Amino acid sequence: MVDVANGINPAGDALVIHVDRVKAALEGFDPDAVTRELRNDLAGNVTTEIQQGPKMIGVRVWIPRSYRTIDSDVGRLLLRAPDGHTVPVSRIADVVPVSGQPQINRENLRRMVAVTARISGRDMGSTVRAVKQILDQPGFLPRGVYYELGGLYKQQRIAFRGLAAVFAAAVALVFMLLLFLYERFRIALSIMATPLLAVGAVFIGLWLTGIELNISAMMGMTMIIGIVTEVAIFYFSEYRALIDEGMAWEEALVEAGKNRMRPIAMTTFAAILTLLPLAFAIGQGSAMQQPLAIAIIAGLTVQLPLVLLVMPALFHLLERRGDKRTPPPAEK
């Protein structure tokens, strides 16, 4: 972690004016009157407003800057007593300069210090785990002090939850579409198992390449659901056509794989070759979408055996268990 900032921001030097009540009373002042006059001299007072276009601009009146430039100037400021005589501030008050004090920031009415840093040469996931390991050590933080991880990490966690909901919704909608298309639970379950197994290959691909699961990778996982399901539908479309021609259903499963193997293979290889430059982070800015490309390539790598071998085997197993004697009816 580089460029670590402790979050302490000095507010700048200040002047503390302690009014001596006895001396002020002898001159005819009370502390509130001294405070009001010093505020008018040093901060100014809005006495009237002028119109500038559609807005009203306040007119602030105060003493010239040359009378309040340095610390000693404040002690020489003249205050007018109620009886009309003037008294310098130094006669009735002590002016004490104070070095810069840290700003007090609050969040939800609690004091907060925002410690910031930048990650260099390392992924966010492992860095955050290392930070948590240090901060969670007993006695590392004083009593009553706690920490919250924010910034890009917090935004990523929020995005993760949103993308997880999108992923679950995509799986549910695709499964409902398959049920509506084929009107058979066994076919829909066989097809739906294929992209879910391909998603498992995405985690393996990210692990082999040493890339953490991030937002881009989750987007690739969601895209894999649609890509693999589309190829599986092509297979079952061929299977249904062979059934309509009078072929036995077990033989149709094998022939559908033979007929669709070449188109599925060419489509898969073309997509993988297209994404390879992005997976190798070739070109400026391509590293940002590298996890997306690796996730899709990992899912496409297992797409061919899943669609042509695993999915027919699963469908065959479900059909044999469902009805061992009667072959399934032809879909129309």
Image (cartoon, rainbow, N blue to C red):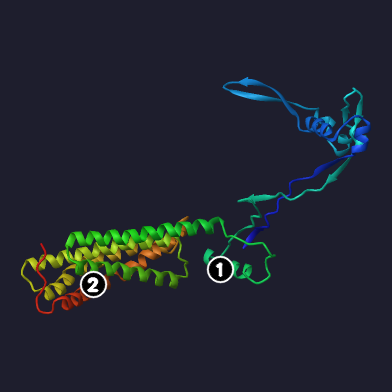
Q: Quadrant of the C terminus?
A: bottom left
Residue type highlighted by circle 1 = Arg
Position above or below: 88 against 220: above
Residue 66 visible somewhere in the drawing: yes
- Nearest the camera: 282 or 264? 264
Residue type highlighted by circle 2 = Met
Image-quadrant location for residue 207: bottom left
Is 253 situated left or right of 307 in this image?
Answer: left
Q: Secondary structure at mark 2?
A: helix
Image-quadrant location for residue 329: bottom left
Q: Position of residue 75 (x, y in %)?
A: 89, 35
> Mark 1 highlights which residue?
129
Image-quadrant location for residue 42: top right
Q: Secondary structure at mark 1?
A: helix
Residue 274 visible somewhere in the drawing: no
- Nearest the camera: 66 or 303? 66
Q: Position of residue 250 (x, y in %)?
A: 13, 76
Q: Residue at x 23, y 72 (%)?
A: 311
Name the N-terminal-most of marks 2 and 1: 1
Is 287 situated left or right of 40 in this image?
Answer: left
- Nearest the camera: 3 or 316? 316
> Mark 2 highlights which residue?
311
Q: Position of residue 321 (x, y in %)?
A: 18, 78
Cα distance between the residues tagged 2 and 1? 39 Å
- Nearest the camera: 129 or 251? 129
Is 103 situated left or right of 193 in this image?
Answer: right
Q: Quadrant of the N terminus?
A: bottom right
Position above or below: 49 against 74: above
* Residue 111, numbered label: none
Q: Position of residue 278 (x, y in %)?
A: 41, 60
Q: Residues within 10 Å of mark 2 (few under 14, many from 20)?
A: many
